[in-house]
Amino acid sequence: MKKIFGVFCILLFATSCDTVKTFLDTKEGLDYKTKIKSDCPSDGTCELMVFKNSSLQIQSDGLGQSFYDMVFDSEKTVIMYEYKRNNENNFQDGDLTERIVFEVRNNVTEFVVEDLELSNLVMFYERHCFCKGETGLFPINKGKLYVNNVGNALEIKIDIEDVDIPFSISYLEAQIK
């Protein structure tokens, strides 16, 4: 009886480890080929992520800080451009991550939005660092978003001129297939 129980435990452990590995190796957005045509700041890395059939729900915690959840929405896609600065000094609190996050309709053909009209979109600048008062979600006050669906590719251009905090990424030109 002990041998059967031992074999059962070993099989359970072996299969659960494989399941966890498979889950961790899977990332949203890998169904798409993304090409970033603009330059990334030389002191970090940039990544473009696509979350089809998702939308953003902006919420607020008890301290007045905003955060978002991604939820299923068959009509929208969330696009996230992320910059991570290399922590060359290896300080525990020396990390910096900045993101431009926005959503578009799945059936979008073409649109251009500028300056104050950007506040009508679900679009924001996100910053995480050890920098008091300069972390969280921030509206983009001045800039331009251009989205064009050409054939089987989505062309995106973002030019940001003003956010209420210091920011490193201000321009994105990319293609999503």
Image (cartoon, helix red, strand yellow):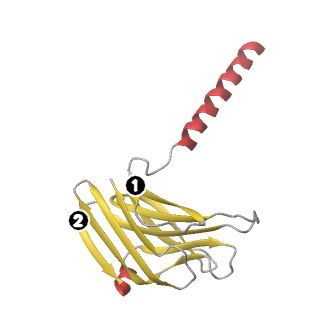
Where does the image place residue 48, in percent across and percent down from the top left?
45, 59
Q: Residue at x 55, y 42 (%)?
A: 25
Location of residue 126 with respect to 51 vertically, above or below? below
Q: Secondary structure beneath disc 2?
A: loop
In space, the residues marked 2 and 1 are separated at their CA atoms by: 18 Å
Instruction: Give 168 or 68, whichever is nearer the viewer.
Output: 168
Q: Residue at x 25, y 62 (%)?
A: 149
Location of residue 118 with respect to 128 vertically, above or below? below
Quadrant that contains the N terminus: top right
**Residue 27 appears left or right of 31:** right
How packed mark 2 is, by other alpha carbons closer than 10 Å (few <14, some 14-19, many 20 or more), is few
Image disc number at residue 82: none
Instruction: Give 54 or 167, whichever is nearer the viewer.
Output: 167
Residue linked to disc 1? 34
- Which amino acid type is marked by label 2? Thr
Tell me where residue 122 sits by quadrant. Answer: bottom left
Report whether residue 94 is seen. Answer: yes
Q: Residue at x 73, y 68 (%)?
A: 93
Q: Residue at x 62, y 32 (%)?
A: 16
Q: First in sequence: mark 2 or mark 1? A: 1
Where does the image place residue 107, in percent across and percent down from the top left?
25, 61
Tell me where residue 71 sits by quadrant. Answer: bottom left
- Which amino acid type is marked by label 1? Thr
How packed mark 1 is, by other alpha carbons closer than 10 Å (few <14, some 14-19, many 20 or more), is some
Residue linked to disc 2? 109
**Residue 152 appears left or right of 56:** left
Report whether residue 1 is seen. Answer: no
Where does the image place residue 64, in percent across and percent down from the top left?
60, 80
